[in-house]
Amino acid sequence: MKQFAIILFLTGWLIPFSLKGQTDSLKQDLSPGFPVVYQGDTLFYLYSSIGPFTPEVRANGIVSRLDQLLATSASLNDTFSIHQRETYVDILSGEIILMSLTEEDALGGNKELIPVAQDYQKILQTAITKQIDLSSPISILSNLGLLLLAVVILWVLFWGVQKLFDLFRGNIKKLERNIFFHSNRFVQFFRFITPKRERDILLVISRTLRYTTYFLVLFFYLPFVFAYLPWTRPFAQKIWMYVSKPLSYVWDSFTSYLPNLFFILVIVIITRYTLRFLQYIATEIEKEQIVIEGFYGDWALPTFKLARVLILAFALIIMFPYLPGSDSPAFQGVSIFLGLLLSLGSSTAVANIVAGIVITYMRPFKIGDRVKIGDTVGDVMGRSLLVTRLKTIKNEEITIPNAQILSGQLKNYTSHAEELGVILNTTVTIGYDVPWKKVESMLIEAALSVDTIEKEPSPFVLKTSLDDFYISYQLNAYTRQPGKASGIYSAIHTQILDIFNREGVEILSPHYGAQRDGNTMAVPPENLPENYEAPAFRINQIIP
């Protein structure tokens, strides 16, 4: 409803402009009129050229002749008159031709030539009379009195503004809590704005408003004061012109930009609601409320994010020609410069983004899976277009660039854990003097003694190598809880130690096999047989 109201408002606002344009199109094709400004007053407009004299040159000539007429006291008593010629009319004061008026000048005011000339004659005569009255000693003394009164009023205004803002600053300094940033919403986003900082911000705003007020008072005061005296009156008009000209330019630019602004607004609304619709569809697919064959639910949000980037880029491309200043060389140069910086400095980022997109649709892991990437083992905590975050068993968070994942090796311990189970394996070395069947049964017993090891499929043992002093036995056991692998390994090793010590079987290494004769059995003392004695070190003499 809010967007609909905005559209209705803009439509209602644009209708007068369109009607005005239609009305203006019915007028004759005339050049813009140039004003005749005399002593700060706009008398009328000129629309046509006479020979080589443009409306601007004609207007300046009229002002010059009026000054000449005002300076010549003998001419002031002359009667203003109109003299009609073939194609134009002269307005005279005695023998001085003040101006000539053409048919085009009259058509600019939508009137006939003679009535317009009569009106302009009265306007010129009134302007001269007004200047004579203002130049009289009585008028000058009266204006000087008004000028002094205006100076007093200005001093009172400055004094009042100063007192008002001093009171405002004093109340600000007494604040002991936040006034504008006290709600929970503001606290969440602006936690750094303490009461002291808010006071500092308000003091800066107060000082800015104070000097702005001083400027506005002077801005309206100076033209008002300058208008009192004849010799300062032109400055008043210049001050108004210096400010009104840019304001008029801004307003004209704004009104001419309204169609482009309306077009941009339509594009923004369409883009916004398109993205909302796509986000709703993606959310429903992720929740599996909408099922698309061959499209996995965990693809929904990444695909939406990619589509959002493309849609926003497409909308920006469409809006770009309608942005203010988009066709200026400076704007285009800045755009090229920024594009060059991005292309040179984002090669690694682009590689990670491309790898992130590929990984998304390869689906090598999901959030929460236990994986091994390079030498790092951990649970997947999050994934973006640039990086993947892992949490190790020691609660360390490790960030890995997606390009490194795509170019390296990745192991996923969770993907088939629920369905088939993951095989955990560990190796022990036992001497040749222990029967291999006994070793296998003890290893399987150790594995089945751990609760997290599956009974079916049952554990199994592989003899991986026959070394010089021992046999390597590899125990393999299934589990559906790969996230607890470290704890499971520890439990299995504990059971192996207990069972082998109970059975009096040594877990050998080459150090024990090198000089076995005379060494004590390498098991805990409490697990040694009763009346056990270490064999003596025997030396046999060889008689030649």
Image (cartoon, grey):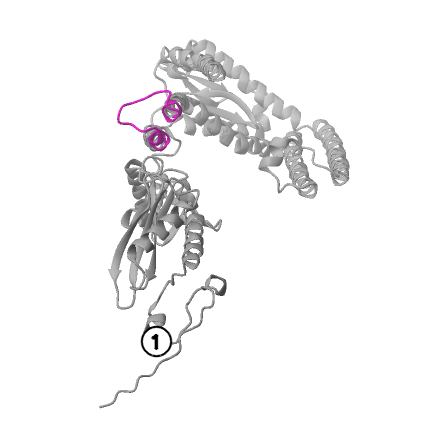
Locate residue 484: give its quadrant: top left
Residue 303 part of the magenta-drawn span: yes
Does residue 343 appear in the picture of this structure?
no
Does residue 302 appear in the picture of this structure?
yes
Q: Is residue 530 left or right of residue 313?
A: right
Q: Is residue 522 above or below residue 39?
A: below
In this view, the residue in front, 216 or 57, is 216
Q: Is residue 205 above or below residue 508?
A: above
What's the residue at 46%, 20% (across, down)?
45
Residue 107 % position (x, y): 40, 13
In this view, the residue in front, 301 or 329, is 301
Locate residue 17: give its quadrant: top left
Residue 235 % position (x, y): 58, 34
Check disc 1: other Cα within 10 Å, few if <14, some if 14-19, many if 20+.
Answer: few
Residue 486 part of the magenta-drawn span: no
Q: Which residue is mark 1?
A: 515
Q: Is residue 414 left or right of residue 240?
A: left
Q: Residue furthest front?
A: 531
In this view, the residue in front, 5 or 307, is 307
Q: Residue furthest bottom?
A: 544
Give the secondary structure at mark 1. loop
The quarter in which the C terminus is drawn is: bottom left
Type of the residue with mark 1: Gln
Give the number of marks.
1
What's the residue at 25%, 89% (across, down)?
543
The region drawn magenta spans 283-305
Residue 411 % position (x, y): 32, 46
Locate residue 29: give its quadrant: top left
